[in-house]
Amino acid sequence: MLVIDQKQNNGVVEVPAEDSFRLELHENPTTGYQWHLPSPIDPALRILDDSFERSDGGYGSGGIRRWTFVADRPSVIALEIGLRRSWEPLPVQTFKITVDVKPR
């Protein structure tokens, strides 16, 4: 499975149609800052899983937000995710990726 992380910010990835891929970004929800996906996401993508795994640093140390997506059909998807507090309208950081879903 293709894993996308902060190193691919502002990049382009290719995914075969009907394949899944994972997006992993660092966040620290104890500070209020969490990654927020656009709503709704592009109809060519489906979210299979959305999870958070705390790092070994103990309570308050943050961890990794993971989303597993499946690309249902060929499309070019510009995905932009914002790191913000839920009560703040503007993100303090953004992660942008273009997902080029290729036909099988």
Image (spheres, grey):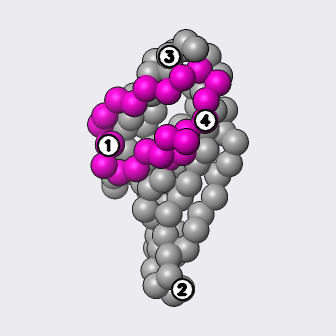
Q: Is residue 59 above or below residue 45?
A: below
Give the residue displayed 31% in from the left and 49% down from the top. Answer: 7
Q: Is residue 87 above or below residue 60?
A: above
Comes first in the chain, label 4 or label 1: 1
Comes first in the chain, label 1 or label 2: 1
Q: Which residues are magenta?
A: 1-23
Residue 102 bears which disc, if any?
Answer: 3
Give the residue displayed 50% in from the left and 20% down from the top. Answer: 101
Comes first in the chain, label 4 or label 2: 4
Res. 44 in view: no
* Residue under label 4: 20
Label 3 Cα neighbours within 10 Å, binned few <14 / some 14-19 / many ≥20: some
Image location of residue 31, percent across then percent down: 46, 73
Single out the mark in the foreground, 4 or 2. Answer: 4
* Residue under label 1: 9
Label 4 Cα neighbours within 10 Å, binned few <14 / some 14-19 / many ≥20: some
Q: Is residue 90 magenta?
A: no
Amino acid type of the residue tagged 3 in the rendering: Lys
Comes first in the chain, label 1 or label 3: 1
Q: Is residue 10 left or right of residue 38?
A: left
